[in-house]
Image: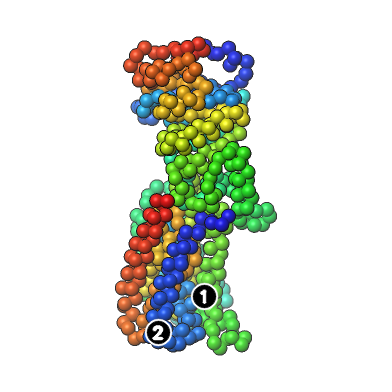
Amino acid sequence: MTLRESDTLREPVLRASGVTKHFGPVRALHDVSIEVFAGEVVALIGDNGAGKSTLVNVLTGVLTHDAGEMVFDGRAVRFSSPHEARSLGIETVYQDLAIAPHLDAVANIFLGREYVRPGLAGTLGFLDSERMERETKSQLGRLRVRVPNLGRRLVTLSGGQRQGVAVARAVMWASKIVFMDEPTAALGVAQTAMVLDLIRQVRDTGIPVVFISHNMPNVFEVADRVVVLRLGEVVAHLDPRTASIDDAVSAMTGSVRRVAAGEGATVG
Amino acid sequence: MEERPGTFARLSNSFTLIILGLIVLVFFGLRGLTFLSVPNLNNVLVDTSQLLLLTIGVTFVIITAGIDLSISSILILSAVVAAKAMIAFSGTLAETQSYQFPNQSVGIPVGLVLGVFTGVVCGLINGILVTRLQLPSFIVTLGTLGVFLGIAQLMTGGTTVAGVPPAIQNEIGLRNLLGGTPLGPSFRLIPPMVIAFAIAVVAAIALNRTRFGRYTFAIGSNAAAARRAGIDVDRHLLKVYVVSGLLAGIAGTFDLMRFGTASVGTHQSDNLAAISAAVIGGTSLFGGLGSIGGSVIGAFIPVVLRNGLVITGVPSFWQNVAVGVVLIVAVWLDQRRRRAEERM
């Protein structure tokens, strides 16, 4: 595998190499290598069952891999839980599993990270709701995410607004890298545009975004690099500035020749 | 924040409150001040305290989208253990059989502690089975409903345990905390009632203001999301079942405090009464929604109904009919309201 020349000059935020994962007899990932650099958007694409979600789950600590190495922020890591990955600044947005619909936006954003009051009240677990609300407002304002009425339970919001909360939560807490598993799959056009905007804003703060999508126009609109998985292997790296959607689809399905499209792309 | 997670639950509380208000109005209309007299309302408060504890415990469980059917059996087993221990530690066999309790100052507290402890252990067993074996709480607690009751029956031969030191009633359970004050003659403020309502206040605060409550709602709303947010879901569920068992254990000791007996025969349908009360109070069996305030009101409804029916001279069996109808109507209205809300 050849590296882009610029890549040799800086360390990736995350480098996984030779990652292999089996579910019983099923080979979900085979010798997958991926690097993510600061300030870029990497799209992971592939047909159903290609291993995209499995890869994200391994990289975020939801699953442990059978073989392979991961280097995060210059250190070799092996996550035993999503909690461990999150404590290092790795956040994930899932398509639908991430929010508690009966709680409001603030409660969701701080879920598992609640601020408690100082002193004895905090020891007893009393929540510092004012502080959480204040911080949510300022962070959402900074990210220019609009969540109407923070105190409303998410069940009363639209799907797009709910996903907005999920994305805002990940972005608020991610200090190193954000993964998004089909963040726009359930969204309408306007909300999709909002999420894509948010992805760019996050990238512009220097935090890389890795996102899975089936939506090729979205991928080509926002990604700096495209990694194509097929049957658990990385089959192509595409540069969206030079490759076409057809190239991507060919690589995903394996129906046509494997594609090395444009300068800077490599075939794995 | 104008609206907190409990707000919508509170809206349905107001519906439950209306039902309670209507019931009160009907009996007031029929029997006037006999029904609304201080002594009678006093009785209602006292009679509600036991069901209230069960309802509060099961409210936490139901908010997590679980169920605890075994609380009635935990209550019975705790009462039996407390009674047996109380007798055993209060004197020799010969002494206690002739109603002499020389060591009752040891026996009574030991009995009460062991009774409550029994509730905790039962709750722990439920929690371990639900979280470790990954079984539905309905199945687990349907099983332990039989197990705990069976153990109580084996311990007693199926009969009521009597012969506990009378001091548990006279000196503790029925002691009027307002005795000696000007209010004493008109209002009986007895420990079981004080304990139950104090626990209700603590439970309401815990549910709405603490991380414990927040996790309870989060798990019931979306357990997978809670897990992904780093919440130790199993550990929290274990705590919730222990709370339910603990409160059922405390409710068990109320039998001894008020009646001086541990009865295996009564209470067997208290589990369903408590679940009904919680649901009437706006707690959703699907999890994620509920409130202690609603459950308190829900617990009052069957007690007020029974009390009012007795005063009115109507066979109190009508209570079962009325509570059943209220339950169905309450859930039906609640679901309609919720669907409308979610369409927004």
**B14 w.r.t. B93: above or below:** above
Q: Nearer the viewer, residue A55 or A96?
A: A96
**B181 w.r.t. A244: above or below:** below
Q: Which of A197 and A236 is in front in this view?
A: A197
Chain letter for mark 1, please.
Answer: B
Query: Does dot 1 land on a helix, a strand or a loop?
Result: helix
Numbered mark located on residue B181 in the image:
none
Which residue is pictured at 50% across the width and 35% down the height? A195
Q: In this view, does A258 lie to the left or right of A35?
A: left
Which residue is pictured at 46% across the width and 21% down the height? A227
The residue to which callout 2 is attached is B29
The residue to which callout 1 is attached is B193
| Percent position of residue B337, x then y | 39, 59
| Quadrant showing the N terminus of chain B | bottom right
Q: Earlier in the sequence, mark 1 or mark 2?
A: 2
Query: Does dot 2 land on a helix, a strand or a loop?
Result: helix
| Percent position of residue A175, x then y | 61, 34
Which residue is pictured at 37% across the width and 27% down the height? A49
Q: Closer to the observer: label 1 or label 2?
A: 2
What is the distance, in whole Å, between disc 1 and disc 2 at their CAs?
Answer: 27 Å
Q: Can residue B206 be seen from the camera position used here?
A: yes
**B142 w.r.t. A109: above or below:** below
